[in-house]
Amino acid sequence: MRANFLLDMDGVLLRGRTPVPGAAEFVGRLNAAGRRYLVLTNNPVFTPGDLAHRLGSMGFDIGADHLFTSAMATAGFLQSQRPGAKVYAVGESGLTTALHGVGCVLTDIDPDYVVLGEGRLDMDMITKAVRLVAAGARFVVTNPDAAGPDEAGLVPAAGAVAAMIETATGRTPYVVGKPNPYMFRAALNFLDAHSEETVMVGDNLRTDIRGGMEAGLETILVLSGVTRAEEVAASPFQPSQVVGSVAEIEV
């Protein structure tokens, strides 16, 4: 029996603003069975409360305590490395709230770290980040995603902006989010769960499945998102199971 679940959000529970058929019912079965689970997302823009509200508006009964973001994992990473660190944060409330929550000081005056998230970023913020990294601030990025969707179409995400800063400074960042196994281990610690009793459910072979596998988790790939069945056959690493959607997963 799988005691615990880590669930990717986009492509697993939602497609844009549309729930995956059967996904809300799957979450309902998790709740009814008393399973421990987290929705694990590389999106650092929103707080858990923001995401819970968004999911609730689409019919999901998921509380904020069931949400774990790359911003939260990044804040935990900084806390483990340098408690009370001074941070120049390039991002929105999901990132700044998580950093404040672990005691970081947000400042552009001699920061220990530049932490890059994503959202409504402007060139002044990016230019300041470049100058601070060039001056010696450690460079950390919440997630590696190069692009993501919004209502108008494709938008650059943290990975694309990080590449700009890296090219300008010659400094390679530490990237916390999936597929980094650190993200999965941080989620397991948050859930107070063990890898041997936890399954990662994701739609992305290269982030969800690879990262889950490297963190020692059972993995289930759903074909309701970005990965096609033919890609799985050609992959050098394989998920533990492949299903059409979360509606097919036994709780």
Image (cartoon, rainbow, N blue to C red):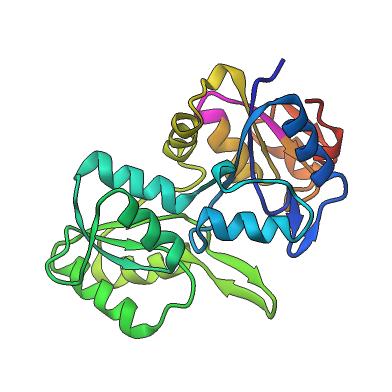
Q: Residue 139 vs residue 197: left or right?
A: left
Query: From where the camera sits, is residue 176 visible?
Result: no
Determine whether 206 is above or below 128 in the image.
above
Q: Quadrant of the N terminus?
A: top right
Q: Is residue 218 magenta?
A: yes
**Residue sitting nearer the eye, 116 or 236:** 116
Q: Vertically, is 196 above or below 229?
A: above
| Residue 72 x %, y % | 42, 49
Judge left or right: residue 180 versus residue 60.
Answer: left
The percent coordinates of residue 18 (x first, y second) are 80, 61
Pick the residue in front: 188 or 29: 29
Please tell me which residue is depicted at 62% across the width and 37% down the height of the picture: 209
Pick the front one: 44 or 215: 44
Residue 108: percent from left, percent from top: 19, 72
Task: Tell me, yes or no, if residue 100 can be seen here.
Answer: yes
In the image, is residue 65 part of the stretch drawn in magenta?
A: no
Q: In this view, does 180 lie to the left or right of 211?
A: left
Tell me the quarter of the image containing the C terminus: top right
Image spot of residue 83 (x, y percent): 20, 45
Instruction: Give the magenta part as a residue range.
Output: 213-220
Residue ID at (75%, 39%): 27
